[in-house]
Amino acid sequence: MTTPVWGRLEDVFVRAERDGEPAQPDLVRAESAVERVDPELGGRFLEFRNGHRYTGRAGSSEFRVVEFERHGVRIPERSIQPGEVGREGRGLAWLMRADSSAATAELHWRMAMPLACIMLALAALPLSHTTPRQGRYGKVAIALVIYLVYASMLVIARDAVAAGEVARWIGMWWAHGLTLVLVGALIVHRAGRRWSLMVLSGRARQPG
């Protein structure tokens, strides 16, 4: 029965510690190495070819150098323990039930993403209008500043909620509220004159 063989390594240098003797490692230097699996035992081995094995501490009486054509070293099996799922991997239902500031911060952060899309879309309405004197890219800098300020406020708000510095019922809503006020001011500035004329004309037509 043939032993399955995986990738081949060239010019291999390996340092392997002995069980219970970490101060005296074995060094293996070989021209090549391949990984094999024992079909009967099921263990994995690293088979070195054409090299030397250095055992013990250099300069001591126990130091040995062994030349070999083939030399196998068993690869220890490591059991992988499943890690605990953090709040980033929890579902919305769990976050809504959890009674902690960290869970509230994660919940508000997830809700902030679609809200941010709406806010930035509203901000694009007044910024999309430009005059010939302003040029096509005259308000790109303003849009970039709004985005950076909004994103920074969201990150600050999330960290503050997670640390318990902000009440959970307030959460990250203050960041959305300030951004909404800023976007509303831009919209009013864009259409303010038109609204003023409509209001004034409407009042003038009312019978005195």
Image (cartoon, rainbow, N blue to C red):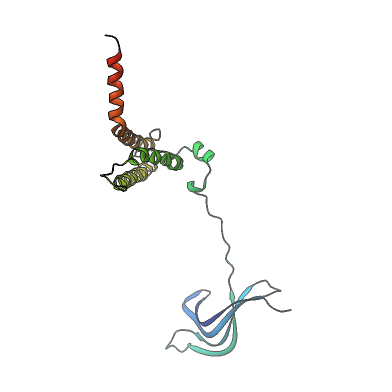
In which quadrant is the C terminus drawn?
A: top left
Query: Does residue 74 appear anywhere in the picture?
Result: yes
Q: Residue furthest front?
A: 132
Image quadrant in which you'd find residue 58: bottom left
Closer to the camera in the image, 60 or 109: 109
In the rendered image, residue 65, in percent from the top left (x then y), is placed at 51, 89
In the image, taking residue 86 as reference, residue 141 lies left or right, namely: left
Q: Residue at x 44, y 88 (%)?
A: 60
In the image, taking residue 89 as reference, residue 140 lies left or right, namely: left
In the image, taking residue 1 as reference, residue 75 lies left or right, namely: left
In the rendered image, residue 205, in percent from the top left (x then y), is placed at 30, 14
Query: Does residue 103 appear anywhere in the picture?
Result: no
From what the image shows, is residue 47 above or below residue 108? below
In which quadrant is the N terminus drawn?
A: bottom right
Question: How many numbered discs, if any?
Answer: 0
Q: Residue at x 47, y 37 (%)?
A: 99
Q: Residue at x 48, y 47 (%)?
A: 88
From what the image shows, is residue 158 above or below residue 34? above
Image quadrant in which you'd find residue 68: bottom right
From what the image shows, is residue 65 above or below residue 151? below
Q: Residue furthest right?
A: 1
In the rendered image, residue 79, in percent from the top left (x then y), is placed at 58, 63
Closer to the camera in the image, 177 or 123: 123
Closer to the camera in the image, 116 or 191: 191
In the rendered image, residue 51, in percent from the top left (x then y), is placed at 54, 88
